[in-house]
Structure formats: C-alpha cells, structure tokens
Amino acid sequence: MNILVTGGAGFIGGHLAERFAADGHDVVVLDNFDPFYAIDIKRHNVEAGRQAASASDGSYELVEGDVRDADLVADLVAGADHVYHQAAQAGVRPSVEDPRKYDEVNVDGTLNLLDACRDEGVERFVMASSSSVYGVPQYLPYDEEHPTTPVSPYGASKLAAERYAIAYSEVYDFPAVALRYFTVYGPRMRPNMAISNFVSRCLDGEPPIIYGDGTQTRDFTYIEDVVEANVTLLEEDAADGEVLNVGSTDNIAIKALAEEIRDQLAPELELVYEARHDADAEHTHADTTKAGELLGYDPDHTIREGVGKFVEWYRENRDWYEPLVRGS
Ligand code: NAD
C-alpha cells in the first residue's frame, strides 16, 4: 500500500514509517524538521525508516516540506492510499508562549490534509490526537464521552483538528479515525519528557527533577502499543468516524515513575522538586475499552517493562542519543 506519514521524521511518525516500511509498504514521509527539539534525533528516525525499507520489499521516501503548504499536501495525498497524520507542533507548555503557531500547524495543517483527502479520496485518514483534549477531569479514567475542555492552546488545537477530521468524515463521506494518545514513550523519544529526562539524568548521576509534588498521575504508553493500534487501522474499518483513547495498561504517579527509574539506575540519588507548570494536566488516565472493542487494542507493556526496554535501548544508543537529549 502507499502510505503517507506526516510528521514521519518525528518520534511517533518515525516508528510508524519504520514499521510500515518493514512490512513492505511504500512509505512517503512529509516533515519540515521543525527545530522544536534536536533535528539530529529526526535524522535517526529517517535512517531507521530507510533501513527498514531496504530490508524489505517496501520503499521509503522523505519529502521535506510543510503541512501548511496546501499544494504540496494535495500532491502527496494524491499518491496515497492511507494517510497517517502525525505532524503537529507538540508541547503543552510552549503552546502558552505561542498559541498562534499551534493553530496554524495543528489546525490549518490538518485542514489541508482533510481537503486533499476529500478531493482525492483515500482508504482511511488516521490522525494523532491527544489526551490533552480532555482538560480537567470530571471523572477518571477518561472514556471518550468525557467532556472535552482543554486547558492549553495545544489541547484546544488538537481538539479542533480532531473535530474537523470527524466532521469531514461525516460530511464528505471518507473514513477518518482520531487516536487520542496518552503520553507515549520509547526509543528515540522526544527530549524534555519525563521518562527521557529521568533516565538521562540518572545515568549521568544527576537526580531526577519533578515539577510539582509528583502526585500527578499519567498513563505512559509504550510506542509499540501505539504502533499496533495504527497498523490495525490499515485493514480494520470498525472505528471509522470514531475517536479512540490509546493509553496504557497502568497509571502511575510521576513520583513513583521517578523512583522506579532511580531505583533501577541510581538508587543513591534523592529526587529533586521544582515548581509545577499551570498548563500541565494534574491527572490523565485512559479508559481503552472502546479501542479494545473496535480494534482489539490490548496494550501489553507495563511501565516496568516499557521503561526496562527504553533503558536497554538508551544504553545501546547512548553515544548519539544522550548528547541530543541532554542538549535540546
Ligand atoms: P514529534 O515532535 O516528535 O513529531 C512531530 C513531527 O512533526 C516532527 O518531526 C516535526 O518536525 C513535524 N512537524 C511539525 N510541524 C510541521 C509542519 N508544519 N509540517 C510538517 N511537519 C511538521 O512529536 P510526537 O511525540 O511524535 O507526536 C506525534 C503526534 O502525536 C503529534 O500530533 C502529537 O500532537 C501527538 N501526540 C503525542 C503524544 C506523545 O506523548 N508523544 C501524546 C499525545 C499526542
């Protein structure tokens, strides 16, 4: 199949492109190498995709460009059977500094893709949404019926994009699915996220820094589980027109996560606490029943297993990854 992965040089898109190429598909990646974090991490994502294609019957093409470029997007969608839209300006805290950019990339960029999908016809449009659309929890775990009241410009932009995708799907009659990811982690993950920070600091003999008192809880979702949900959507149509939570098996407080990583890597270190950021969610927790029913989604990495795999990968790739993750 011909698969367009926007944001395919990023963390999640990079893993999707790699998997699709390894499975023998013809993959085109659209990414503008936004300097939000170290671009060399993105080069490694691209290299992984190229290697996967060279070891299979698949192919891999990188197009450096912007989802805000409607003509380019239309050209690329015209050659695609499936579109996996992962490109976004990510990051809750920076969205408070520059909300307009989040609107332009996350909302207008998504509309460019949706216009092209409407005009060209695609087998399915799958987009990355976020647990940030929920905002302040009225109950936990969040199911998809939970009110959506995002508390950051980032969350608002992801909600707008997701609603456009579902509305286009209904009005223009093409299959679209939005997956609400809950804090994804794993090899080549972004810097400035709790797990990459904690691991790199502990391995360097520096204490993990917790923002707030560490009682905030999160679903941490291992990247392989996220990839499986997306791969299922190449064939499965049961979720067309739907929004689904893609979370993890267990929910953990940031403090407990820091202790788990510290105990595995550097038990002598004391945790350090700094001021919490207001835009950060206090608690997120996914009810994944719907994704289980419609996609057979069954995340099977506990936090201990996932962190263990990430640490193993980190040690093997420390020479190139650590300077990038620490320098970003
Ligand atoms: P990422 O920043 O690693 O990947 C996003 C990619 O999009 C980057 O490579 C970036 O260069 C590219 N990009 C940004 N602006 C672009 C533009 N204008 N045109 C083309 N490409 C552009 O982030 P990620 O963690 O891989 O996230 C992927 C998707 O998943 C995003 O849509 C994000 O909102 C969503 N998401 C991620 C998480 C998570 O925990 N990582 C959680 C919830 C939702």
Image (cartoon, rainbow, N blue to C red):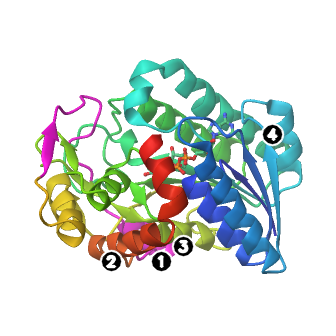
* Residues in magenta, as a range: 271-298
Pick whichever of labels 4 and 3 is earlier in the sequence: 4
Label 1 C-beta lies within 8 Å of the nearest ligand 1 atom: no
- Residue 228 is tagged as 3
Determine the CA span between mark 1 and mark 2. Answer: 21 Å
Pick whichever of labels 2 and 3 is earlier in the sequence: 3
- Could you tell me which secondary element the residue under label 4 belongs to? helix
Decide which of 170, 88 is in the foreground and name it: 88
Q: Main secondary structure of the magenta part?
A: loop
- Residue picked out by circle 4: 73
Image position of 80 (left or right of 270): right
- Residue 296 is tagged as 1
Query: From the viewer's perspective, is the residue at label 2 or at label 4 nearer?
Result: 2
Determine the CA span between mark 4 and mark 3. Answer: 26 Å
Pick whichever of labels 2 and 4 is earlier in the sequence: 4
Q: Amino acid at mark 3?
A: Glu
